[in-house]
Amino acid sequence: MPTSMSSDSGTAASGESRQILTFVLGGQTYGVDILRVQEIRGWSAVTRIPHAPAHVLGVLNLRGSIVPIVDLRMRFALERAEYTTITVIIVMSVITPTGRRDLGVVVDGVSDVVDLDIAEIRPAPELGARGATDYILGLASIAERMVVLLDIDRLIGRDLAGVAGAVSEAHDADHSGVTDASGGPPAGIGVSGCAPAQSGAPVDGLTAAAGAA
């Protein structure tokens, strides 16, 4: 059980806290290290990549960078939902077998940014099935909600290794043909047409969190 919210950081000291972004998927609340989050934006149509895993929907062109888009509902084998104007894409940085890169994950909606004491993280229960909780850093209770803290590298990073070549070929073959979503905010964490915060806390707090990081 890792003690750090980020899989590439050192062991957390006693009393250390981290900021996490919480989001909702199928009625469950999840959290990721805010330091991994690059941008939050509304849904945009993607360019499909042949032979990619089903949950890898395709790619977007974000200001010249080709970013794979993953549907977390499909990754978790949940019932599919229609992509609408309130669907949210969280662009974050992950570590793959081929190096660090950005990707977008499709979620139902973002909640807020919260401070979490590392000491309050509890290990995920043993569920018997091998690999069932490998991508879970731990569980934490936040405002009477049980939040599942995700290791985004284990959850998605390995999946992207198989589509990296196809993404590069798509970019080289027809750069202008990849869906252009460059109308978003400048580089760094921003909010572009995303769903309102479900907890009532302003999502604009992401900007301040990014500055602190």
Image (cartoon, grey):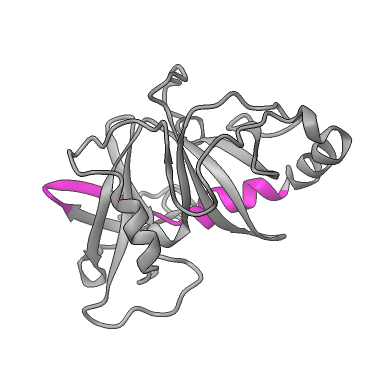
Horizontally, is 88 left or right of 114 in the view?
Answer: right
Residue 7 in the image: above or below residue 55: below
Horizontally, is 56 left or right of 84 in the view?
Answer: right
Residue 189 in the image: above or below residue 54: below
Query: Can residue 183 be seen?
Result: yes
The C terminus: image quadrant: bottom left
Write the residue at 23% across / 56% down.
Answer: 140
Residue 121 in the image: above or below residue 28: below
Whole-percent x, y for residue 191 in the image: 41, 41
Whole-percent x, y for residue 101 in the image: 63, 55
The N terminus: image quadrant: bottom left
Query: Can residue 154 be seen?
Result: no
Instruction: Give the residue at the far bottom of this rendering.
Output: 13
Seen from the viewer's position, the closer of residues 69 and 63 is 63
* Location of residue 136 by image quarter: bottom left
* Location of residue 174 by image quarter: top right
74 magenta-colored: no
* Location of residue 145 by image quarter: top left
Write the residue at 47% across / 58% down.
Answer: 36
144 magenta-colored: yes
Whole-percent x, y for residue 13 in the image: 30, 83
Instruction: Give the residue at the far left of this rendering.
Output: 144
Instruction: Give the residue at the far right of this rendering.
Output: 173
Q: Which residues are magenta?
A: 142-161
Q: How many marks?
A: 0
Whole-percent x, y for residue 156 in the image: 56, 48
